[in-house]
Image (cartoon, rainbow, N blue to C red):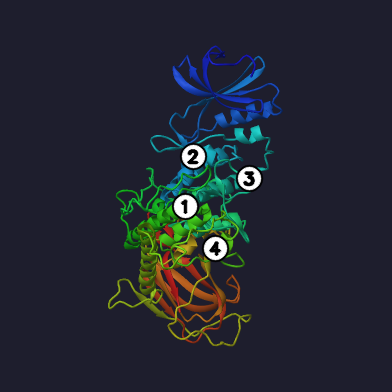
Amino acid sequence: MQGVGPGTIIEGRYALRRRISRGSHLERWSAHDTTLEREVALTIVGSDHPNRAGILDAARRAAGVTDTRMIRILDVSTQVDNSYIVEETMTGAESLAALLLQGSLPAEEARRISGETASALETARQRGVHHLRLTPHCVLRTTDGSIKVSGLAVDAAIDGTEEPDADAASRRDAVAVVAVAYAALTSRWPLNEQVVGVEPAPRVVGGVAAPSEIAAGVPGDLDALCRMTLNEDTGPLTPGDFASQIAPWSREPVHRVEMVTAEVDPTVVQELPRPDLGSTSGRVAGDQFAAPGVTVTPGAVAAKVVGSALAGAGAAAGAVGGRVGSFARAATDKAAAALGDTDLGGERMTLPEALSGHYDEIEPPLPMLPASTAQAPSGDQSKIVVIIVATFVALSLIVGYFGLQSIGQGVRQPDAAPKGKVTVTAPPATSAPSAPSAAPEGPSAGQPIAILSATGFDPQGDKNEKNAQAPRVYDGNPATSWTSEGYNSAAFGGLPKKGVGVLLDLGQPTSVNQVAIDLAKGPVDLTVYASTTPGLEGATVIGTATAASGHVELKAASTMPQAQYVIVWFTKLAPDGPWFHASISEIALS
């Protein structure tokens, strides 16, 4: 900008100190407010900027949003030919984009950052202001760990983004917040617009790879929200929807825990080169372990051991030569964490197929042994072979261990005297005229039936009953649960609905004759249906329970007809503080 430089006084108050960045007809400076004796950030908008009026209008609207998670706009003015936007300075803060240069963040830190960001944008939305240009560069973590959002409305105005209607703008911000969560979990950006310094997410048939296909330790609710929003065009409609679906989150930052690898002979181990901008570091699942003070499960400890072995093997490979692409490294991270099978669903491409389109060239490896078989291998070569063999042995032991652990899982073993157990034998199965009258052969009695997917079921309401939480009912973790929306009475607070629940998709017609449900809240009234369609019309009753709490088992009186869907339908809710809810920890079908 002409006539502007270090020492220039703006508005007789702001003394420019250092130019931070420069764009087309825009400059950003650090400055000192001589009136209030504080540091500020100052954006200069040149008179020849094609959207100067729109930028200033956006800044004034953003200045009216009061939220501690928003970077405050302190002043908007015009002097001579230039206009100015003055903001509070964020000395020492790091953008999410900068944090991701070191790799993905712990899952609960990703939850916290995206939750705080969504809450800030929801405050703005309620004032009629939208961001419309949210990227990891707009999300800052300060020195004390608090989250700040920059560029509200202004960044979109600078880019000339046309503002859509309120509903479309809310949805756009909601999708962007989900993308921020995805980036924090995977260190990759899933939307089409490229973000400088952040590697794009790998593309598969149907969209982008799910976070759980790339990174270890991704929570089921965040993984499901990313799938629904980014690949299925469903999910939250507003930032507030997203915040409520992932709550609660930690109020304190959750830091990475560095891996401590076993000592390796220095004649073999070599330091791997630092990654280029936008690529991931050669980490081995270390980002996914809990912060100090958080209990680490034996599975995590086992993953740590394998991670150490993999780190040693990777270093040995570095001594031999060869470069591995960042996406392939992420696949190694996932293997090191010993995760279970991932449900890719539908026509989506498998992870090995996705890998084929996201790798760097690998140079031919050096021979492990000399060309002459008569010549004995060197000491270094012997060490390399030993490390690689030891790694595969360790992986085989871990895979075998988890395979043995999984035998029998999904088959609920009855306790001698279970607390709060309710066993109900249903009356003879009844169905509407449209239901099939025949009962084709189903699985043998007691054989577990896999659940393909789950969603909230609210056919008489807004069709959204904590949908993103529903996969928790079959994740094998009793500590997680699906919980309905809160109502002010057990009968849904006088709303015109007779019930809410969870819809389970089995993927194919199956005869379900027994349902075991662990209720997180009670007492409740519920009925379980089998249906050929994702609705109650024509559904067949499997069983009913009244005033049920704890563990509930429902057994059909006769062999059930085959159906693809199972609906757990609550008709009376349980008291839960000032509200009433239905809540399920786990469901098992057979």
Mark 3 is surrounded, within 10 Å at the Cα level, by few (under 14), some (14 to 19) or many (20 or more) other residues, namely few
Q: Nearer the viewer, mark 3 or mark 2?
A: 2
Residue 154, image x and y in percent?
Answer: 61, 32
Residue labelled with disc 2: 98
Residue at mark 3:
193
Q: Residue furthest left?
A: 417
Compute the Cα span from label 3 to label 2.
18 Å
Alpha carbons under labels 2 and 4: distance apart: 27 Å
Task: Pick out the residue farthest to the top.
Answer: 12
Asked which secondary structure carries label 2, the reply is: helix
Q: Is residue 506 visible?
A: yes
The amino acid type of the residue labelled 1 equals: Ile
Front tag of 4 and 3: 4
Identify the secondary structure beneath mark 1: helix
Which one is earlier in the sequence, the residue at label 1 or at label 2?
2
Name above or below for residue 162 compared with residue 40.
below
Badge 2: residue crowd in 10 Å (few <14, some 14–19, many ≥20):
some
Report if the CB atoms under discs 1 and 2 are less than 8 Å apart.
no
Q: Nearer the viewer, mark 3 or mark 1?
A: 3
First-in-chain label (2 vs 4): 2
Which residue is the site of mark 1?
246
Asked if the residue under mark 3 is in contact with the one under mark 4, i.e. CB atoms within 8 Å, the reply is no
What type is the residue that disc 2 sits on? Ala
